[in-house]
Image (cartoon, helix red, strand yellow):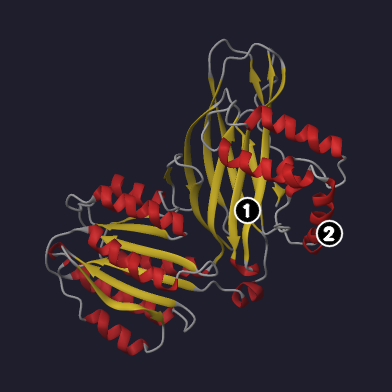
Amino acid sequence: MDASRNLYAILGIPPEASQDDVREAYRVAARRFHPDANTNEGVDIQFRDIAAAYEILGNPVERLQYDTSRRKYKDELNYFTVRVTPSKRVLSTLAEPQVIYMLLEIVPMKIGSSNKQQHEARLNLTLVLDRSTSMKGQRLEKVKIAAQQIIDQLSPDDILSIVSFSDRADVLIPAAPVSDKTALRSMVSMMRAEGGTEIFHGLSAGMDQIQKYLAPRLVNHIILLTDGRTFGDEDQCLRLAERASQLGISISAMGIGDEWNDVFLDTLASRTGGNSAYINSPGAVVRFLNDRVRSLGDVFTERLQLTIAPDADIILESVFRLQPSPQPVDVSPQPIPIGALEYNRPISLLIQLQMPPSSRNGFRTVARIDVTGDVLVAERQGYKVLSDISVEINSNPPPRRSAAGDPGRLG
């Protein structure tokens, strides 16, 4: 029995709820989210949690055991909160579908600068660097400088590996704790430009390296930098990204110049919750890579995943990340990886839903949102925050205004 999970929040009831309240909450949730009644993706994931919560809370003996074990989490911090603001709190009755937007904000807990330094995240970092012929000259030299500066800023507790690739891949620095920085910088300086661009070779070698020290207490991250289009292996790269996501590894993809495939790199990063970015000049490489690595050191909640369970008659159309690093997010499959949460830097996403035609006045539920992540600062895996969203349908709505959804419930 996992007492760290807030089963009462999953059922949407207070801890003092009666057994009748528990049964009624389960019946309501089953009407909304049972896969036989609701075929939206994300519903089955959340219903498994609901059914598991009811299995314990619906049994008085197991509930008592759970409540006893749960006491040590009574004063647990709110590591992050979830705010949901609908574009409209009151919708007009319409004989046709209408679109509603939800602004989802994931806000980290406030922490002092001294505590932040004390709990700086440990990195398991792999750099996958393009050394194809088109990188020859200033581009490759700036990449070397950036990699050497990254080596200098890492601590002995961090894990680093570096892979260079063209139409084949070489492991310049095998995965290991950062120790002899002079020797590591010398290895980077030996990189030479040659050959074509086949990204899968580089990513595959990078995956092999990062898995050597893969651990939930670390920020496990691959940074890919390329200046060109890969030749015939995009599907292989995307399948590798899906596997990386399942293992809790995120990928940031950075393109330099104007020859790279932005759609491909966006998709590659999105499937792991990573970022994609465009670097317009060799001179920007050093600053950009260093900034990215510093931001990884600021992570305190890693492997964030989002599950959106709309009601049966509502369609999830799209999700777009607004910050950090604006880009579209794949809504399938769920759970949706959304990356890492940094100290003092919220994540915000825009969710687009299609509402059905409506003719009856009154309040109605829209969707239930589940955000789950691993809190590194507390070594707390699977920390969960839930938010259940409702709107009002009215044939004569007041002037347009927006309002937040229900406060996120902690779990």
Judge whether residue 74 can be spotted in this image: no
Secondary element under disc 2, as helix, strand or loop, is: helix
Judge whether residue 364 can be spotted in this image: yes
Q: Quadrant of residue 121?
A: bottom right
Residue 181 position (above or below residue 212): below
- The answer to whether 201 appears left or right of 69 in the picture is left
Secondary element under disc 1, as helix, strand or loop, is: strand
Residue at 67%, 22% (x, y): give it.
399
Residue 94 position (above or below residue 239): above
Where residue 68 is drawn, which disc sits there?
2
Residue at 25%, 65% (x, y): give it.
282
Residue type, mark 1 in image: Val
- The answer to whether 310 appears left or right of 17 in the picture is left
Give the mark nearer the N terminus: 1 vs 2. Answer: 2
Q: Which part of the image, by quadrant, shows the N terminus? A: bottom right
**Relative image position of residue 270 (x, y in whole percent):** 41, 49
Residue 287 position (above or below residue 151): above
**Relative image position of residue 203 (x, y in whole percent):** 29, 61
**Relative image position of residue 150 (x, y in whole percent):** 38, 76
Where residue 107 is drawn, which disc sits there?
1
- The answer to whether 134 appears left or right of 241 in the picture is left
Residue at 58%, 25% (x, y): give it.
312
Residue type, mark 2 in image: Thr
Q: CA distance from mark 1 to mark 2?
A: 30 Å
Residue 182 position (above or below residue 288): below
